[in-house]
Amino acid sequence: MGMEEARTALGRLTMAAISHVFTIRRAAEILGQNEKLIWQVSDDMEPEDGALWVYDTGNPETRAFTADGIDALRELISERNLRG
């Protein structure tokens, strides 16, 4: 899709919206890792990497990840395992 085709009627660029995220607990389950490791590995991840903060009334905050964030975690864990 070209730049001109990606513009909406209001002249704004169209971007794919995030429709869901996975909590850090769910990310740990998906990746077969413990939650503590996911906290450590994701410490330097930014929203651009697919890492977000989610705020709730019962739990002040937790990390959550987009599908791209899960992929980034998978790579970071792999790199960590290669280093030793």
Image (spheres, helix red, strand yellow):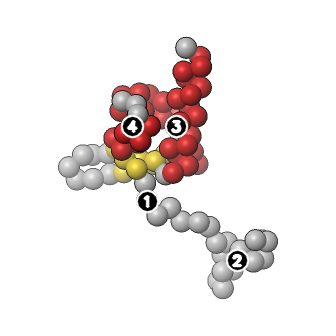
Q: For numbered disc 2, what is the local secondary structure?
A: loop
Indicate which disc, 1 or 2, sits on the residue closer to the N terminus. Answer: 2
* Of pointers 4 and 2, the one earlier in the residue sequence: 2
How far apart marks 1 and 4 lie (CA) works out to 16 Å
Q: Amino acid at mark 4?
A: Ala
The residue that label 2 is drawn on is 7
How far apart, in angstroms, are the residues tagged by discs 4 and 2? 38 Å
Instruction: Give the alpha-carbon distance from disc 3 to disc 1, as whole Å.
Output: 17 Å
Q: Is residue 27 above or below residue 36?
A: below
Tell me whether circle 1 and circle 2 mark residues in contact (CB < 8 Å).
no
**Mark on residue 28?**
4
Relative horizontal placement of residue 29, taking residue 6 as reference (left or right): left
The answer to whether mark 3 and mark 4 are in CB contact below 8 A is no
Tell me the tag on residue 38.
none
Q: Are marks 4 and 2 in contact (CB under 8 Å)?
A: no
Q: Amino acid at mark 2?
A: Arg
User: Which label is found at residue 73?
Assistant: 3
Q: Residue at x 59, y 19 (%)?
A: 82
Q: Which badge, 2 or 3, is on the more N-terminal residue?
A: 2
